[in-house]
Image (tube, rainbow, N blue to C red):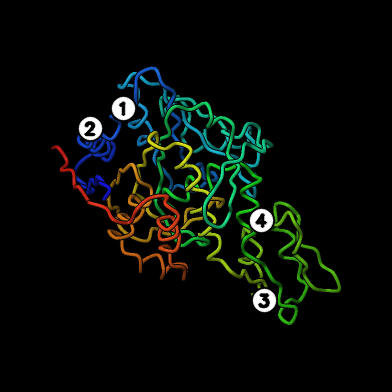
Amino acid sequence: MENVFFSRIDAGISYPYQLENLIEKSNIFSQIEAGRFVAVKIRVQDAGNIHRLDPLFIRVVSEKIKEKGAYPFLIDTTSYYSEKRRDALGLLKVAQLNGYAEQVTGVPFFAADGLGLQEGYPVISDGLLKETYIPYLLNECDYLVVLSDCKADPHTGFSGALKNIGAGLTTKKTKLKMHRTVSIKVDDELCDGCEECMGVCALRIPKIINAKAVIEEPACVRCSKCLKICPQKAIKINNLENLQLAVSSSARSIVNEFEGRVLFINSAVNISSADDFSSVSGNLICDDIGFFASYDPVSCDKAFLDTAGVDLFIKKHGIDPLIQVMEAEKISAGTTNYNLVEIANKV
C-alpha cells in the first residue's frame, strides 16, 4: 500500500503556503541528496489558458528542493500538434508568457527534447507500446519531480501524473505512435467538402478530394481539432481507449527508468476542461480540492479521482479516466491500493 499525502484546500490560507506545508510535513523530498540535478516536469499549455499550473506552486517546489542542497530546473517537451510549442523556441516563449520564467519560478526552464527534433533513446515499455522514446536529457537527471495540474481531458477523460509523464515526457516519435493507436474516419455521407478541417489543422493534413475530406496520412496525430470544427459532425475518432492504454504504457517506462528517484505532486486547483493545446481556458468543473503527493503516480491519480469523483470526468467528456489508472496498475507502473494521509494546514 502506498501513502498519498493530501492537503485539503483551505480558502482562508495561502495556497502556496499550503503546498509548502504539505512538502514539509510529508517529508516527500527526503530522498533528494545535495549536489544532485533535479528535473521538475511541468506541463506548459498554450498561452491564453489561465486555468493552468500556478507559477507560485512551482516556486514553492523549487525552493524546497534548493533547501536540500540540490539543483532544480524545469522541463517539458515540445508538442507535436501545437504550432506555438512545436519547437524549443516556441515552447520557451509560451512558458515565459505563462509565467514560468526564472524570475518568477526561481529556476531555469529547458526543452527536454532539444530543439524538438530529437528522436531520443528507447526504453522498453510494458503494455500497448512495447517501446518508448524519451529525451536524452533525462539520462543526465538524478531525480525527477512530476508536478501536474489535474484537469478533464477530451482524449483521456482526465489528465494528471500518468499523462504528464506518459505523454509529456516522450519525444515526437512516441507522441505520434501513441496518438495513432486510435483511428480517424470521415463519414462521406455527412461530409459536404466545406474545407473547415483544412483551415484548423496545424500540419495541413486534410485534403478535399472529389468534394469529400480525406484526412488519413502517417503524420496525422489525431488531435481532434478537425473533429471539433466540422459543422456536419462527419469526422469521428474510434478506439479512443487505446490512447489511455498507450499513456499508461509510456508512463511505465518512465517510472522504470527513474525507479526510486521519482515523486509526484498533483495540484487539484483550477480544475478545468481545457485542452493542453488550447489557448482558451475552458470551464472550471469543480471547486478547488487541494494537493496530493506520492512516490506512486497510480496512487496519486487514483486518490485525486476518488476525492473529486470519477463521474465528474465521465460526464464532461464521456470517457472513463480509470482506464489509464487500471492499465497502469496492471503493467506495474503503480498501485491503486493507497493510504490517504491528510496533512493539516498550519495557521
- How far is the residue under mark 1 from the one under mark 2? 8 Å
- How far is the residue under mark 2 from the one under mark 3? 54 Å
**First in sequence: mark 4 vs mark 2:** 2
Q: Residue furthest right?
A: 210
Which residue matches tag 1? 64
- How far is the residue under mark 4 from the one under mark 2? 41 Å
Which residue matches tag 4? 221
**First in sequence: mark 1 vs mark 3:** 1
Is 19 positioned to the left or the right of 209 in the image?
Answer: left
- How far is the residue under mark 1 from the one under mark 3? 52 Å
Three-letter amino acid code of the residue under disc 4: Val
Task: Give neighbour class at mark 2: few <14, some 14-19, many 20+ (Cα, 10 Å).
Answer: some
Which label belongs to residue 232? 3
Which residue matches tag 2? 24
**First in sequence: mark 3 vs mark 4:** 4
Q: Quadrant of the C terminus?
A: top left
Q: Tell me the mark number nearer the camera, choosing from 3 and 4.
A: 4
